Amino acid sequence: MISDRFNTNEPPRDFEWDVETFVQAMRAGLFKENDRYELMDGRLLEMPTEQSHSIVSTLFFQALAQVFEAQWLV
């Protein structure tokens, strides 16, 4: 099991893999419990509330943009 913990005031620096992970997690299910986001592959993202909302929103819109971009390219 891989565990990634973000417990600082800075956002993760590797957003690129997070977007793909987030897309996969949205397809499979994303669980939230007290600002601990457990992804289906066992990774755990843990961060302060205001940061988690910001990062999850950012990742959601990046993932959404990728979906729309893929739709237009087909």
Image (cartoon, rainbow, N blue to C red):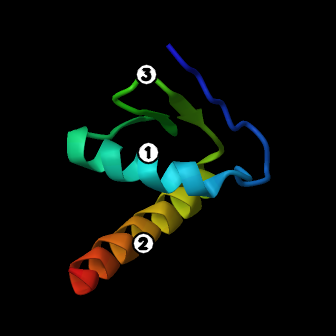
Report how far apart the C-alphas of labels 2 and 3 lie in the structure: 23 Å
Is 58 located above or below residue 36 in the figure?
below
Is 41 located above or below residue 8 in the figure?
above
Query: Residue 49 vs residue 27: left or right?
Result: right
Identity of the residue drawn at 32% across and 45% down: 24
Identify residue for label 1: 21
Q: Quadrant of the C terminus?
A: bottom left
Query: Residue 51 vs residue 63: left or right?
Result: right
Quarter of image, res 66: bottom left
Residue 14 vs residue 12, the one in the foreground: 14
Q: Which mark is residue 37?
A: none
Residue 74 vs residue 71, the one in the foreground: 74
Q: Which mark is residue 61?
A: 2
User: What amino acid is at disc 1?
Assistant: Thr
Q: Which mark is residue 42?
A: 3
Identity of the residue drawn at 79% across and 53% down: 10
